[in-house]
Structures are given as structure tokens and as C-alpha cells.
């Protein structure tokens, strides 16, 4: 089902939603810096940045999350309490790449044996309203990883910016609930033609940057390759790429306590930090940047595909834009794909 | 042309085996950026570049390559970091060979990005202009209007401490411009300053890009990772964010060269250099010490002098 | 490699929550605590369940581990030292090394502790059916091996295995774990136990020699035999080639790996070796499996 939503009605549309839902959308914290946050009024929403620094994974898997609180009192043992999600939620304004990434994380968090209840509860209670990418950036390569700037899978509603209005596609049961929304108007055929044009233009712009096909098999042969000895050199071992990456999902669990009260908290962690795999004995199975950058690339393009059949990268380009030393994952994959890293001298950076 | 001379010099050093490795900058995939590059063969030297986008402080890599003889491309600030590290005896075995380049001050790419509408596809320097092109625009900006805050207040652009100087030294001036953020905060009341600080650090995502980009942060165990005692939690609580930045700034006091690598590395555009620059100003006022200027001057915060003014010492 | 999947402690319960939270520890009480070694660094905790229904649901096999939780300090993974045949309590032997383990060393009898488990894959008991078993342990890595030995020494399980040979070594006599049990096992005729130390003392009457050398001496036959080896990296480094020299094939040598863990259920990502997680697909691996994985351990 399709409708049209005029931009002049957009804020009112959101205001209505805020009465019944918790709304998460990109918010500008400073010029050029956006994150996904819970908003209280429509004026906070900022859709101008195509790739907000922090991705939509924050909405389902917050950077800092209290798993449970406890209080120790007397001999009864501690009382443990968890937080429940009270209201229904809406994720507004994420791009197709971020939504594809949620599915990638979901495969790990919602497994056969164990379920990450914190993630699942949020996922179940959230209606996803995705925004298409009419003008992908040169750093975007979603089509190389199986996505596209107009990919609808995983979304409940899909918005396409037509200039003065949005075309709204209702894709799932959760989306169809909106079919009676008082701001939705009828679509006219010109709109559909415009959508087609925008879609084609966007596809053309993204192109096909890197050969991901068969990367898993090629990396199988490269576990001890000299490639890793050189490619890690410029990486400074910060967490920018992992924290901004919409598919990265590693976390650390710590207890924060004061006397008899406390919380067990989980925080994002990065395989590029040296302490990530550091054992109490002092032994570190990944002692240098060589092993750690190898872990990151192999996990995304070899280990994850082995288990789940697709690469754990959606081509959003955040790691390329925000890396302090411009480590370009596209070049790394291109290089690993082509010559298996041989003859590296002076050619790969 | 500095770039050409740099390439020739690097080629010569590698050919004569005076160094095992030259660390410099090279063009890479994005406009307004360069990337650190590690050259091991004379042939590879031709990929070295020098322009207003060479923003990293390559000194940070010396810790990783301490077993090799390294030729390091340094700007004025970077060379001062090396001097500061030498004071801390970081490179006893293989002191780096400094290839100094008098700096024309660097372009703040984030500021340029904000000045145009749309994605930047190409940026070319032409004299004191910066020609920036996008899909639907082409503008000519005055380079000097788009310099990094740390560069605007830089009074030590020539790396005099370098073994080799490529190009002519820049004239030293004692005060170019006070650090804009420091001036801004000095005009604020304590409550206003705290609000400013909280707003900036409130965006922090604890990625530690600032720490890793900094050549002076080389502790085997950072205070953040210490568990016994646990000084700080790992969460994004306001108190942890404030604590991290305050302590890191204090750990830099008298050691920071003001290169701005921390601020440039930050993905959330948090202003950081004002903290260390203010502290450095105080060190200058109290002890007459400026990081990396005089190689023989002892670091004031790790030196005891009976002439020290503070009463509690006596 | 088939594993008894029915031995899982977490099933969907009748909680009003749709899905049970795998991060919530179940409450246990410290029944007994004793120092195991002369250097006082190893302490065995015997834990009992606070709620009987939790005990009923807790089914495990030797080789599995649990995350022990000390509220306010954190969690850490420990191999279950008691056997499933030893009902009523769970035993863990803790090496004092960091924050959590120091807290575990300070727990008094009667205090409360949390547990999550059983986790991991455990030893491949069904593969061992009708075969001989050679168990080689070093230092305080003997915890899950105790579970394995006790399991097969139980009268119901002993007939399932042919010969059992146990070689257990420590640096000094005082550092051997489970000393009373070792004495009892020595008296049995349905297993061969060889304990050894690197340096003896005036009271030590047993063997003196490094584990790899003792293995060479004992020279168990690889025919129809599985080997399980657990110990510090240095011991494994020198013992493994001896097993190879005795012609044990990779597929029949198993080990239990350790890695830094947090969630213990394959979510937090950190304990992976290649595409396998030590907490979920391990910690027990055969050397044939490990040969195909990167040396990330």
C-alpha cells in the first residue's frame, strides 16, 4: 500500500506518533554530528546527514545498557530487577544499510540456544520507518554487500523523499496499521515515475565498488598471509570503526557498584582494543595490531559468512569517512580479493 | 617544490640504508585527506606527498616501530612531540631521524565540509586558495579562513629540532593568535565553562581515537583500563565522560605539543585542544617551560627543584 | 562431532517473560570452601542451589563450565570440577588472579553467589563409548578432568569405557589439586593413575618428572584410545608432540581451551577462534578442529 505525506504535515505526523510511541530518530548534536536518540518533540529530528555517526543499532543495542540492578539486603540474598520496555517504539529515518545491519546483528543475538532478550524485546516492539537514499555518497558501497539505497527488506514503512513530500510504502503488518493515518494522502502517478527515476539514479551512483563475491574462500587461504603484517601498520587501534559500524556487536559486561547496590552493565567493546582479548594471566592471544586487524576483517568477511552465509558489512562507509588515519576497507578487500596480498610492497596502504 | 624534495630525500635515505623505514603521508581515497604511509624501498618514496591535509601526528607511530630505524616526516608540532618523548627516554635504541617540513598550517576539513552544500568530490590547493568541487558546486575558498584552531595559534611552525629540513624555515613569531577556544572560555564564568565542557564531552563515545592518535599517550595500561584499582567505569555516564577527558588533559600537561591530532581524530567533533593548551599556558607561566622547544629543559611536572615556588614543598 | 545436546540448563521456563534472560544468574549458596594448594592460590568452592527447581533443571556433562557471578565484581568462567554423578552440589576450583577470583576467594561459607550455566559443549562422552581413555592434566587445569574421571569411575558409567589412564602433574606436591581423591583413585584397580611433580619434597613418595616425559614412559597405546589433555600452554607445547610420537591422531586428541569470556553464550563476540566460539562451540575442541583455525589462543 502506498500513500503520500506532505512535508508540511511531517511534524504533525510525528507529534501524533509521540503520543503513543517512543520515537527514535537522528538528532544533530553539533553541526555535522548526528546520532540516533529518543526524541521528545518533532523539531529535534534531523534527516540531513545521510550517514549519522552512530548508526541505528543504538536503538536496539544501546552503547551502555543496564542489564539488571541489584540490591543486597540481609540474609535473603540480593533482589535483582530488570527494566521492561513499556511503550511501543518507532525507529524513524534510518537508511536501508542500517536496517540491513540490524538483521545481521539479529542472527547472532537471537540464536537457537540463547536469546539476547534485551535486543529481542526492543526489536519486537519497534516499528521501523526507513528513509531511502536518493543521493548516496561516494563512500557508500551497499550494493557490493548485497544491499541497495532503496532496499525495503526489514522495514515496516519505507519513505522516499520526493522534494515537497514523502512517498510512504506500507510493507508489513506493522506498517499497515498506519493505513488510516490522517495525514496520508493519495499517491498520483507522477509520484511513482519520480520514484523510479530517483531509484535508478541512486543505483547508478552507488555502482559496484568492491568484489565481495567469493571473498570468504580467498580469505580462507590468507590466515597467515604477509598481508596482515603490512595492512595493520597505520591502524592506531581506536574504536571508531567498530563503534560507528552498524553491524559490529561486540560488548563488554562490567559491574558498577556502590556498597550494596549496583548494576550489571554492558558497553560496546572493540576487537581493536588490546584489552579486548587480554587474559588475567597477562597472556594476550592477539598481542599486536596485526592479529587484531586480521580479526576484524576476517570476522566481517570470513568467520561471519561461514556461519550465516553473508558478509557482516552493509557498505555504509562510516569506517571510511571517520577513520582518523583513513584506513579504507574497500581497498583492503579489493587487495585481498585480487592478489591475495602478495607483492604488497609500497602498493597497499 | 617541497613535495618533490621530500620524495628525493626519502629515496636517498632509504637507498643509503640510513633508515629502515620512512613514515610519511600519501594521497588516498578521500578528498581533503592524506593517509600515513610506511615506505621501505627507495622506489616507494614517490608516493610521499606534502600538502595542507597532512593532519596526523606521525610521532604516534614511533612506539610501534621502536625496533627499526625510522625516518619520520614531521611538522613543527610533531617535532616538539618527539623532543618531549626523548625527555621521557622513549627511544633509547633507535632515535628517529626527523625529516622536518616547515608547516604552512593545515586545513580543517570539517570546517570546509560545513562551508559547502553537498559531498565534496575534489579539493585542490592553489596558492592561498582552496578549490572545492562537488557534484553541483564549485567554490573557491580562502585557505587561511579554514585553518585548524590549533594551527591558528601555532608559534612554532618550523621543526628546528629536525635533523633534515626540507624547504625554508618559516619566520617564528611569538604570538600569532591566541587559541580561539581558550579565549572563548576565558571570557566565560565557571558555570558557563562547565556547561560548555559538558556539552562537548557529552557527545563522547569512548572510542579513544583521541588517545590513540596522541603520541604522548603510550602507557602500557591506560588508567581507563585499570581494574584494580578501578578509576573509571566504561559507560557513557556524564561523570565518566567528564572524568576521562579531564584526567587525559592533565596527563598531557607540560607534554602536549598542541598538534591537534586528538581533535582531528574525534568522530564526534569534540573540541579538545583548548583543555591542554590552557594547561600548557599555565605551565609556561609557572615554570617558564614550553613543550619540545629546548631539548635539554627537564619536564617541570616530573622534576623537583629546590627553587620551586610552591610552599607545600618546603 | 556429536554432543549430548540434552544437557542444557536453560529451557523456556514458565516465567511470565516470553523468553528466559540468559544473562541473569541463578542464586547458589557456598556450602563449603577449602584451600586446595600450599601456595593458597587455589580454592575449591562447593555450591548448592538456593531453589530446588533450579537444581532439577541443571543437567550437565563433564567439560562444561559455568559463569560464576559475584554481584559488584563481575563474572568469570570456571570449569565444573564435580561430576554430574555427584548430586546435590557443584564444585569449582578457583585460581586467584584478578578482581572476580579474588572476590571468590573471600566468600565465606553460607554466602550467596550467582551462576549461569551449564555452558559450552563438554567432553564428547558418546565418542568415548567402548574405547580407552588417556587423561593428561597439568597444574590447576585439572578441574574439568576431575569431572571426567569421576564421571567414568561411577559404577553406572565405568562399564562404558575400557581402560582409563590418568597422568596428572604439578610443579610441586603441594600444588596438586584434590589430593584426597588422588589417594583414593590410586587404590582403585579400574584405572591407572600416575601423579608426578617437577620437584618433589621430603614427603613425596611418587614420581618426579615432567608430564611430557612421564607420558613417554607410560606410553599408552593409541589403539582405540582417546586422549584428553588440559594444562598450561607450556605443558601442552611439550606434551602434544609426545602424543603425536605415540601415533595418536589429531581427531582423537581433545583439549579444553580458555579464552577471555564475558557473556559465555556466543553473543559478546570476544572468545572466538576463527568462526568458532570457545564458549559455545567449545571449550572442548579436537586438535583436528584446531589445526584448521587461526592460532588465536
Image (cartoon, grey):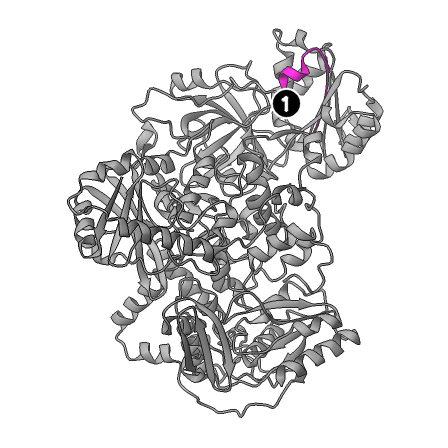
- Chain label for disc 1: C
Q: Quadrant of residue A328?
A: bottom right
Is A228 above or below relative to B160? above
**How many marks on residues?**
1
Q: Name the quarter where the N terminus of chain A is drawn.
A: top left
Q: Locate residue B298, reporting x and y percent.
A: 57, 79
Of residues B310 and C123, the one drawn nearer to the viewer in this rendering = C123
Which residue: 37% across, 54% down? Answer: A197
Is B294 above or below relative to A16? below
Task: Look at the image and say whether residue A128 sits in the magenta stretch.
Answer: no
Report the residue marked by disc 1.
C1
Of residues B107 and C127, the one drawn nearer to the viewer in this rendering = B107
Q: Residues within 10 Å of mark 1 (few under 14, many from 20)?
A: few
Q: Secondary structure at mark 1?
A: loop
Residue A163 lies left or right of residue B176; in this view the side is left
Q: Quadrant of residue A27?
A: bottom left
Residue B31 visible in rendering? yes
Of residues C94 and A287, the one drawn nearer to the viewer in this rendering = A287
Residue sitting farthest toward the left: A182
Of residues A84 and B48, the one drawn nearer to the viewer in this rendering = B48
Task: Look at the image and say whether residue C128 sits in the magenta stretch.
Answer: yes
Tell me the magenta residue range: C123-138
Which residue: 66% across, 44% down? Answer: A218
Residue A8 lies left or right of residue A229; in this view the side is left
Residue C271 visible in rendering? no
Q: Locate residue B21, reporting x and y percent.
A: 71, 69
Is B122 above or below relative to A286? below
Q: Name the quarter where the C terminus of chain A is drawn.
A: bottom right
Is B34 above or below relative to C168? below
Q: Locate residue C281, reporting x and y percent.
A: 57, 30
Which residue: 68% across, 34% down? Answer: C290
Q: Locate residue C282, reporting x and y percent.
A: 59, 30
Amino acid at each position: 500500500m502506498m500513500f503520500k505525506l506532505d512535508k508540511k504535515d511531517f511534524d504533525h505526523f510525528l507529534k501524533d506518533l509521540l503520543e503513543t510511541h517512543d520515537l527514535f530518530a537522528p538528532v544533530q548534536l553539533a553541526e555535522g554530528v548526528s546520532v540516533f536518540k529518543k526524541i521528545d518533540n518533532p523539531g529535534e529530528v534531523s534527516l540531513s546527514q545521510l550517514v549519522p555517526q552512530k548508526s541505528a543499532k543504538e536503538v536496539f543495542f544501546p552503547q551502555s545498557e543496564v542489564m539488571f540492578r541489584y540490591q543486597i539486603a540481609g540474609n535473603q540474598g540480593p533482589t535483582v530487577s530488570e527494566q521492561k520496555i513499556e511503550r511501543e517504539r518507532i525507529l524513524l529515518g534510518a537508511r536501508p544499510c542500517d536496517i540491513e545491519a540490524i538483521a545481521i546483528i539479529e542472527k547472532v543475538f537471537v540464536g537457537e540456544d540463547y536469546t539476547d532478550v534485551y535486543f529481542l524485546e526492543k526489536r519486537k516492539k519497534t516499528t521501523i520507518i526507513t528513509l531511502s537514499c536518493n543521493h548516496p555518497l561516494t563512500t557508500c558501497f551497499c550494493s557490493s554487500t548485497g544491499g541497495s539505497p532503496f532496499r525495503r527488506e526489514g522495514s515496516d514503512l519505507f519513505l522516499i523523499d520526493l522534494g515537497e513530500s514523502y512517498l510512504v510504502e506500507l510493507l508489513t503488518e506493522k506498517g499497515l496499521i498506519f493505513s488510516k493515518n490522517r495525514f496520508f494522502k493519495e499517491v498520483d502517478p507522477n509520484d511513482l515515475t519520480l520514484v523510479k527515476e530517483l531509484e535508478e539514479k541512486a543505483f547508478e551512483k552507488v555502482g559496484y565498488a568492491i568484489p565481495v563475491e567469493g571473498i570468504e574462500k580467498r580469505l580462507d587461504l590468507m590466515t597467515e598471509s604477509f598481508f596482515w603484517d603490512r595492512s595493520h601498520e597505520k591502524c592506531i587501534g581506536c574504536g571508531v570503526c567498530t563503534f560507528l559500524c552498524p553491524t559490529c556487536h561486540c560488548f563488554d559486561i562490567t559491574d558498577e557498584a556502590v556498597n550494596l547496590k549496583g548494576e550489571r552493565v554492558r558497553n560496546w567493546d572493540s576487537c581493536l582494543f588490546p584489552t579486548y582479548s587480554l587474559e588475567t594471566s597477562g597472556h594476550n592471544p592477539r598481542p599486536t595490531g596485526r592479529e587484531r586487524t586480521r580479526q576484524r576483517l576476517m570476522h566481517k568477511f570470513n568467520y561471519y559468512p561461514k556461519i550465516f552465509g553473508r558478509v557482516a558489512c552493509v557498505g555504509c562507509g562510516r569506517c571510511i569517512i571517520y577513520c582518523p588515519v583513513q584506513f579504507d576497507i574497500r581497498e583492503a578487500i579489493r587487495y585481498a580479493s585480487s592478489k591475495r596480498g602478495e607483492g604488497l610492497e609500497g602498493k597497499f596502504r | 617544490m617541497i613535495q618533490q624534495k621530500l620524495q628525493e630525500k626519502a629515496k636517498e635515505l632509504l637507498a643509503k640504508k640510513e633508515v629502515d623505514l620512512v613514515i610519511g603521508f600519501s594521497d588516498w581515497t578521500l578528498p581533503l585527506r592524506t593517509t600515513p604511509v610506511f615506505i621501505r624501498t627507495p622506489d616507494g618514496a614517490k608516493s610521499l606527498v606534502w600538502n595542507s591535509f597532512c593532519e596526523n601526528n606521525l610521532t604516534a607511530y614511533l612506539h610501534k616501530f621502536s625496533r627499526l630505524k625510522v625516518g619520520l616526516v614531521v611538522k613543527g608540532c610533531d617535532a616538539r612531540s618527539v623532543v618531549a618523548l626523548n625527555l621521557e627516554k622513549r627511544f633509547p635504541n633507535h632515535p628517529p631521524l626527523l625529516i622536518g617540513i616547515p608547516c604552512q598550517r593545515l586545513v580543517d576539513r570539517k570546517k570546509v565540509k560545513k562551508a559547502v552544500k553537498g559531498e565534496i568530490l575534489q579539493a585542490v590547493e592553489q596558492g592561498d586558495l582552496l578549490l572545492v568541487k562537488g557534484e553541483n558546486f564549485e567554490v573557491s575558498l580562502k585557505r587561511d579562513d579554514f585553518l585548524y584552531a590549533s594551527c591558528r595559534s601555532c608559534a612554532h611552525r618550523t621543526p628546528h629540532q629536525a635533523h633534515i629540513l626540507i624547504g625554508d624555515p618559516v619566520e617564528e613569531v611569538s604570538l600569532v593568535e591566541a587559541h580561539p577556544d581558550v579565549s572563548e572560555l576565558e571570557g566565560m564564568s565557571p558555570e558557563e565553562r562547565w556547561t560548555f565542557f559538558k556539552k562537548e564531552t557529552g557527545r563522547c563515545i569512548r572510542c579513544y581515537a583521541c588517545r590513540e592518535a596522541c603520541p604522548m599517550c603510550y602507557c602500557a595500561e591506560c588508567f581507563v583500563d585499570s581494574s584494580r584499582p578501578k578509576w573509571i567505569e566504561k559507560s557513557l555516564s556524564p561523570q565518566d565522560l567528564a572524568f576521562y577527558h579531564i584526567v587525559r588533559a592533565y596527563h598531557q600537561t607540560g607534554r602536549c605539543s598542541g598538534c591537534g591530532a586528538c581533535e582531528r581524530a574525534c568522530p564526534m567533533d569534540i573540541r579538545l585542544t583548548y583543555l591542554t593548551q590552557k594547561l600548557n599556558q599555565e605551565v609556561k607561566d609557572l615554570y617558564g617551560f614550553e613543550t619540545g622547544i629546548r631539548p635539554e629543559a627537564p619536564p617541570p611536572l616530573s622534576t623537583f627543584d629546590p627553587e620551586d615556588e610552591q610552599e607545600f614543598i618546603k | 562431532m556429536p554432543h549430548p545436546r540434552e544437557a542444557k540448563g536453560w529451557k523456556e521456563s514458565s516465567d511470565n517473560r516470553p523468553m528466559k534472560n540468559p544473562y541473569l544468574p541463578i542464586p547458589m549458596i557456598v556450602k563449603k570452601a577449602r584451600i586446595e594448594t600450599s601456595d593458597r592460590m587455589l580454592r575449591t568452592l562447593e555450591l548448592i542451589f538456593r531453589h530446588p527447581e533450579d537444581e532439577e533443571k541443571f543437567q550437565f556433562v563433564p567439560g562444561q563450565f559455568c559463569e560464576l557471578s559475584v554481584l559488584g565484581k563481575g563474572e568469570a568462567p570456571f570449569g565444573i570440577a564435580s561430576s554430574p554423578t555427584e548430586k546435590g552440589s557443584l564444585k569449582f576450583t578457583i585460581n586467584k588472579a584478578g578482581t572476580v577470583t579474588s572476590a571468590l576467594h573471600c566468600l565465606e561459607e553460607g554466602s550467596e553467589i550467582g551462576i549461569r550455566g551449564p555452558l559450552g559443549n563438554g567432553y564428547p562422552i558418546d565418542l568415548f563409548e567402548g574405547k580407552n581413555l588417556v587423561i593428561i592434566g597439568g597444574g590447576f587445569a585439572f578441574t574439568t578432568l576431575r569431572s571426567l574421571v569421576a564421571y567414568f569411575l561411577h559404577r553406572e558409567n565405568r562399564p562404558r569405557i575400557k581402560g582409563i589412564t590418568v597422568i596428572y602433574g604439578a610443579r610441586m606436591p603441594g600444588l596438586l589439586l584434590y589430593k584426597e581423591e588422588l589417594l583414593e583413585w590410586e587404590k582403585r584397580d579400574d584405572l591407572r593413575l600416575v601423579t608426578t611433580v617437577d620437584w618433589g619434597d621430603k614427603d613425596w613418595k611418587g614420581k618426579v618428572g615432567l608430564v611430557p616425559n612421564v607420558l613417554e614412559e607410560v606410553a599408552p597405546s593409541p589403539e582405540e584410545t582417546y586422549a584428553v589433555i588440559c594444562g598450561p600452554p607450556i605443558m601442552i607445547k611439550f606434551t602434544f608432540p609426545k602424543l603425536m610420537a605415540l601415533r595418536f591422531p589429531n581427531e582423537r586428541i581433545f583439549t579444553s581451551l580458555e579464552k577471555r569470556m564475558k557473556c559465555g553464550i556466543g553473543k559478546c563476540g570476544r572468545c572466538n577462534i576463527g568462526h568458532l566460539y570457545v564458549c559455545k562451540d567449545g571449550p572442548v575442541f579436537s586438535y583436528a578442529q584446531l589445526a584448521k583455525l587461526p592460532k588465536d589462543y
